[in-house]
Image: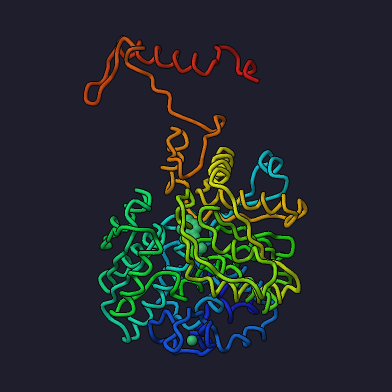
Amino acid sequence: MKPADFPKEVQPYLIPEPGGNLSYRCLGCDRTHDIHQLLYTCPDCGQVLLIKDLMFDRLKEIPGEKWRMIFDYRRMLKVPALKGIYRYHEFIGPMIPLDAIVYLGEGHTPIVEANQRLQDEVGMRFFYKNDGQNPSASFKDRGMASALSYINYLIRQGSLSNVLAVCASTGDTSAAAALYSAYLNPRIKSAVILPRGKVTPQQLSQPLGSGAKVFEIPGVFDDCMKVVEALSEKYPVALLNSKNAWRILGQESYAFEISQEFEYETGKLVVVLPIGNAGNITAVMSGFIKFYQTGIIDRLPKIIGVQSEHANPVFNYYQQADTHKRKFEPVSVRASVAQAAMIGNPVSMPRVIQQVDLYNRLAGMERVFFTAVTEQDIMDKQLQVNRNGHIACTHGGESLAGLMVAMAGGIVSGAETAILDSTAHALKFSGFQELYFDDRFPAEYEITPNANYINKPVSVHPDHLDFTPQTGKPLKGAEFDTFVAQVSTYIADYLQIRTGEPDDYA
Ligand SMILES: *Cc1c(COP(=O)(O)O)cnc(C)c1O
Ligand SMILES: [Zn+2]
């Protein structure tokens, strides 16, 4: 449908004009800083920033009911800039004109209900929201679309040129950064810094394929992050890590999409997220808060943040029940299959502390919880759900493991409905599945394969056969017929299927 064909009362709202008054707000000293500059930490006190719309209250003048209608109609538009995260333009980047928006197909990811068998096994109704179905196959594209649309806007305005974008990464940030930068080639070049051997081959192939300069350095992610911070402090580079508050803004779309998909009835929802650098959970809390404050949703969903026992500084912090005694301590990470979350000193920790506090205060009760899970459970849950039609990555397995710990601990009841974040596509982490199936996990992972989940290809060997085709040397005539008959009999015997009527297989 074309905009002119929509109901008259939504027409003026369908295509948003640039608006709002965005500003960087420091989490340490509460000062605000001009948004028309690349800024990652407060020049006054060094603390991380969030982006605040100083005119946010204008959004409250539109009733929640009207907003819901705007988003539902906007969803039917055929305007690319408004198809992804900017369907929620007024809440994500109101100052960005539509022609500066970079849309590569991110956002609007599917929410898939688990089959009955899996729901029975888990003991509650739940869905996966498949953020692996973003263009670079992880949720990082949401934040990258926001960060690069903003940079594109500055370039078009003339306040920025020849941008060198850099990031440190556990794999997925660099894939997303390289992809979005490549789209803006040659105005943006990108360089990514990875911990050698700590990203999967698929993740390494992504920035290479997008044409980014890739630097592999010794150490873990936290070491890479320090190098990138040093670079961004000394040189004029655009930092694309989640320290960049624009990333957080874009990732809020995950919360908006869940709200919309559940008809804005969020009171019985439990949203489960794996935590690494803690940018995503910050964004999801912030997104729900914005929709709550504007009356678009009337209850804040429960949030469960999950960490592996091998990288759990956020979980540890919240173990202390007395809020005054809480003290953040970075941890030394150990090997984890939730490798993209293998972070001991999360950049967004101050943001988490602030947002959890605000979230619980607005809800009038404790609404954000944290759980820790074993590496064994992460792998087992991933394999279990994927054998039931999902495409969860290891972190998606971590989400389910975390939900089940929360259920066992009485944090979640069977009457609620859970939305689990599968933050990336299963294929990115298929190497871990291979280690599991081959029972080759190094001891440090503490994972023992469950025989029920092991699956390997069955090789039909030439010594079972009289004739075998080869590349460039196809079989012909009777030899080919013999080959087909022998292989099909072998497979039928292996599967113990018999000839006969289809009814026989019942
Ligand atoms: C980045 C990432 C995470 C962790 O998200 P944070 O925002 O760093 O907490 C989890 N899973 C995957 C697949 C990721 O790429
Ligand atoms: Zn400050």
Q: Is residue 416 above or below residue 89?
A: above
**Direction right: furthest residue:** 415
Give left or right: position of 327 versus 341. right
Q: Quadrant of the C terminus?
A: top right
Q: Is residue 287 visible?
A: no
Give left or right: position of 500 versus 203. right
Q: Nearer the viewer, residue 144 or 317?
A: 317
Classify residue 154 by image quadrant: bottom left
Q: Is residue 485 above or below residue 221?
A: above
Q: Nearer the viewer, residue 16 or 394?
A: 394
Q: Provide residue 289's location: percent of width, then percent of height.
A: 64, 74
Point 46% across, 60% down: residue: 343
Q: Provide residue 314's location: percent of width, then percent of height.
A: 56, 64
Q: Is residue 191 visible?
A: yes
**Direction left: furthest residue:** 472
Q: Provide residue 137's location: percent of width, then percent of height.
A: 44, 55
Q: Provide residue 85's location: percent of width, then percent of height.
A: 51, 68
Give left or right: position of 289 versus 429. right
Classify residue 303 by image quadrant: bottom right
